[in-house]
Image (tube, helix red, strand yellow):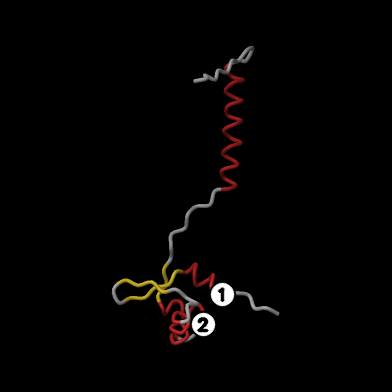
Amino acid sequence: MRDNYLQFIQVTPEQLQQAILKGVKEQLEELKESFQPKEPTEFLTRNEVKDMLKVDLTTIWNYTNKGKLKAYGIGNRVYYKRSEVEAAIKPLND
């Protein structure tokens, strides 16, 4: 196994500390720019989706049956993921 050694010649402890801090600060800035916190999944009821899209409950039912919206359930409750509802809205071709 090859050992890696780093030797500092004519470097004061303060200069070494400043060099380390500069490197750490640069890496933190890069991390801040690329970091995206994970958003919790927000579930909406059928009525909330209806109000969001300004349509009737029958339309929500039709969208679900046609596969345009994906429904999730627990017990006899039906929910939709907000991100999927928003992603289902597509631009119209002109």
Query: Based on the displayed image, in which of its 4 quarters is residue 24 positioned?
Result: top right
The residue under label 1 is: 89
Residue type highlighted by circle 1? Ile
The local crowd at label 2, few if under 14, some if 14 to 19, many if 20 or more residues have their Cα within 10 Å, is few
Q: Position of residue 21 (x, y in %)?
A: 58, 29
Q: Is residue 11 left or right of residue 66?
A: right
Residue type highlighted by circle 2? Lys
Q: Position of residue 75 (x, y in %)?
A: 29, 73
Name the residue at 50% across, 77% down. 68
Name the residue at 43% across, 85% down. 57
The local crowd at label 1, few if under 14, some if 14 to 19, many if 20 or more residues have their Cα within 10 Å, is few
Label at residue 54 = 2
In 3D space, how far apart are the residues under numbered discs 1 and 2 (Cα atoms)? 13 Å
Single out the residue that lies furthest toward the left: 75
Picture layout, residue 41 above or below residue 30: below
Between marks 1 and 2 in the image, the one whose residue lies nearer the viewer: 1
Q: Secondary structure at mark 2?
A: loop
Q: Which residue is at the front of the view, 44 or 88?
A: 88
* First of labels 1, 2 by sequence position: 2
Q: Position of residue 88 (x, y in %)?
A: 53, 73
Q: Position of residue 61 (x, y in %)?
A: 43, 83
Picture layout, residue 79 above or below residue 38: below
Name the residue at 43% across, 62% down. 41
